[in-house]
Amino acid sequence: QVSYASSSRLLSNKNQFKSFLRTIPNDEHQATAMADIIEYFRWNWVGTIAADDDYGRPGIEKFREEAEERDICIDFSELISQYSDEEEIQQVVEVIQNSTARVIVVFSSGPDLEPLIKEIVRRNITGKIWLASEAWASSSLIAMPEFFRVIGSTIGFALKAGQIPGFREFLQKVHPKKSPNNGFAKEFWEETFNCYLPDGSKNSPASTSFHKGHEEGLGAGNGTSAFRPPCTGDENITSVETPYMDYTHLRISYNVYLAVYSIAHALQDIYTCTPGKGLFTNGSCADIKKVEAWQVLKHLRHLNFTNNMGEQVDFDEFGDLVGNYSIINWHLSPEDGSVVFEEVGHYNVYAKKGERLFINENKILWGGFSKEVPFSNCSRDCLPGTRKGIIEGEPTCCFECVDCPDGEYSDETDASACDKCPEDYWSNENHTSCIPKQIEFLAWTEPFGIALTLFAVLGIFLTSFVLGVFTKFRNTPIVKATNRELSYLLLFSLLCCFSSSLFFIGEPQNWTCRLRQPAFGISFVLCISCILVKTNRVLLVFEAKIPTSLHRKWWGLNLQFLLVFLCTFVQIVICVIWLYTAPPSSYRNHELEDEIIFITCHEGSLMALGFLIGYTCLLAAICFFFAFKSRKLPENFNEAKFITFSMLIFFIVWISFIPAYASTYGKFVSAVEVIAILAASFGLLACIFFNKVYIILFKPSRNTIEEVRCSTAAHAFKVAARATLRRSNVSRKRSNSLGGSTGSTPSSSISSKSNHEDPFPLPACAERQRQQQRGCKQKVSFGSGTVTLSLSFEEPQKNAMANRNAKRQNSLEAQNSDDSLMRHRALLPLQ
């Protein structure tokens, strides 16, 4: 059997229909095409209606499968039949009327759909888009002008039209007289020319019975038909326009033509078969005179010929013929008001997916006049920058639009999910695209970076200025008294401290990250080491016993520089181990803030950084201890108070640095460390050197050897006076006759008298040396007396012989004072 109109997909089951072939496409392709059209117009909310038969049910089932793959939701699904009662029709119409879906997919034939359409027209339910299967897309029962206001937006499928050679000429030769027994020709003639054939044309019983039945039907159906004029038989069939004469849009007729010619070609292949090349056993051929149906079927399955339109005709494994669909849109003819079928596209079943459907939207009229595509979605489209959010209890097509979260974007309408931006990008304000993240570090060009740079440059300038002043006045007492060589090294280390802060500014690179912490740590350790050695040396000098040549050797410059080197070397070892085991590196931090990439230095090992800062603070603590212990030494010589203040500033800065460093992030980590370096460096520079620079530049009268020695000697005489007065008191107890003792040395004299002043006040110069005078006097008060010290730097005169005869006890006491003075003069840098 070769069918020209049976399109049900059930017929493709070869286990059940082994000998069935057809020249009409399978409905399975039509259902796929319907889903493709809905997807093309971006509809996702539809209703379905199907005929309750083997045509409608399988077709709409296949459509549901295709719709589910495309996320198309079905609002309702109803079955209809031409035999349905009025109540069932009313129920279906109620569903259609109450549905929010505007697109209705109908898999039905014209007769099954007609009762439903009539009820919809009666209720005047408009605004629906009908997607028609080929069985009713061009049906004259539905495509009527009075129905157009309801179904004018119909888009349907039609079988591809073909041309039959000679068919027009055949129709032009049709005449009842040539085929008196052909009742169809007689009916065609009477309907075309609106007449009836006279009784004289009834030449046979068949025609007579047909004519009588026809007249009875006319009389019963329409009383006016009985008044048709008789046909003369001379009517010209070519002079009238009738659908019967439309040979340009042959659809079913063309399928009939293909079915007949397929069988003809199969018989022709059997007739021309050459033995040895046949389709049967051993290449045998069928006998054309005794051909059987199964032999014809065998040749039909292997059929392959080209029709008159140049198309290849062959049946596939399911017995289906390769076919395509035309897509039509119903228009209302402006000439006579009839419904015409405008071809607006086509569907190629066997093309690649995505290339099968072609639609010319410019030809489509929605509702007969509009060019705007209707909306048939459960929810409005989600704009770019949003995504579809599921509403609980609703189909997937019913959704809410949810804004994309930060860091994600969507650049298309109705996005199911937002795409995440690449690592170095962030979503823009509307979340429609990704923009590069802001790069942030402590830059040279930003105000904060400029301010820190200016302070660092200012520190370098001031340190260089102090170094220049010390170099220029290197032979003055103040510079000599501060241990000139160590001061130069201390100033150099401060230059390194200020310079190391510049490594923390600018975009961090691997080399800057590995250089900045060691540079900062080594510079500060060198600085603290110099201060520690200076302070410790002076303290030991003033507390030491009478020095020997061995003391002078070990407390020379070589030992001082050696101690500085050893202290600094420990910090160098810490830095080398750090750089070898866990070197710092540049790091792009994406986690601190979403929209900003912080370029920082990953320290590699926080433990190593802790050791570096901890060792520096340890040296500073030791230095603070010695400075505090030597705070009562001569201020002009040792500046112990200023060192103490500088160490206090140092501790305050770095103790404050730890919580600030731990609580900040990004570029402010570098800024906090730069501030700490600058503050500590300025504290050391100001406390240790500014007072000396002030005296050198603005108080040159105090930058003399007498001023320095006066202060130093005051401390020495105070110690000697304490010992002398203590021994004098012991002597008075032994001998009440003695009121006091006087001793002299080649360079000093001491006198004492009793008084009742406060116990042990600090010594002070009674008056500064006068101009042109190279001596000074100091008055020291004790609880039991006052000692006036007189120090002369002139060459002492020989004392009289009377002094040599002084009492031995007084001479011994005076000798203790000489020992104390000479001990300090032996180690003074001024010598």
Image: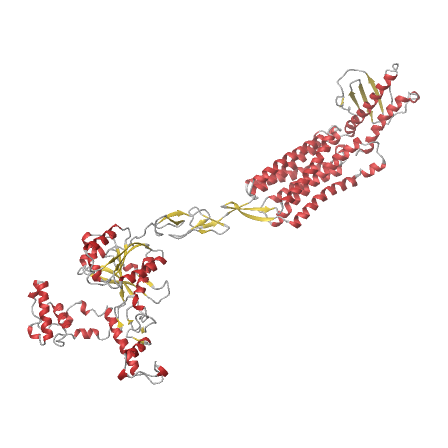
Identified at 88% across, 14% down, the residue is 737
The image shows residue 285, relative to residue 769, as above or below, that is below
Is 367 in front, or is 142? 142
Using residue 455 as the reference point, say whether residue 756 is left or right of it.
right
Q: Quadrant of residue 350?
A: bottom left
Q: Position of residue 708 (x, y in %)?
A: 77, 29
Q: Quadrant of residue 235?
A: bottom left
The image shows residue 99, relative to residue 687, as above or below, that is below
Using residue 428 as the reference point, say whether residue 504 is left or right of it.
right
Identified at 14% across, 76% down, the residue is 179
Is 678 in front, or is 254? 254
Q: Position of residue 541 (x, y in %)?
A: 79, 33
Using residue 269 as the reference point, say whether residue 696 is left or right of it.
right
| Residue 233 visible in the displayed image | no
Is 90 in front, or is 739? 90
Using residue 830 as the reference point, say whether residue 618 is left or right of it.
left
Q: Position of residue 726 (x, y in %)?
A: 83, 21
The image shows residue 331, relative to residue 429, as above or below, that is below
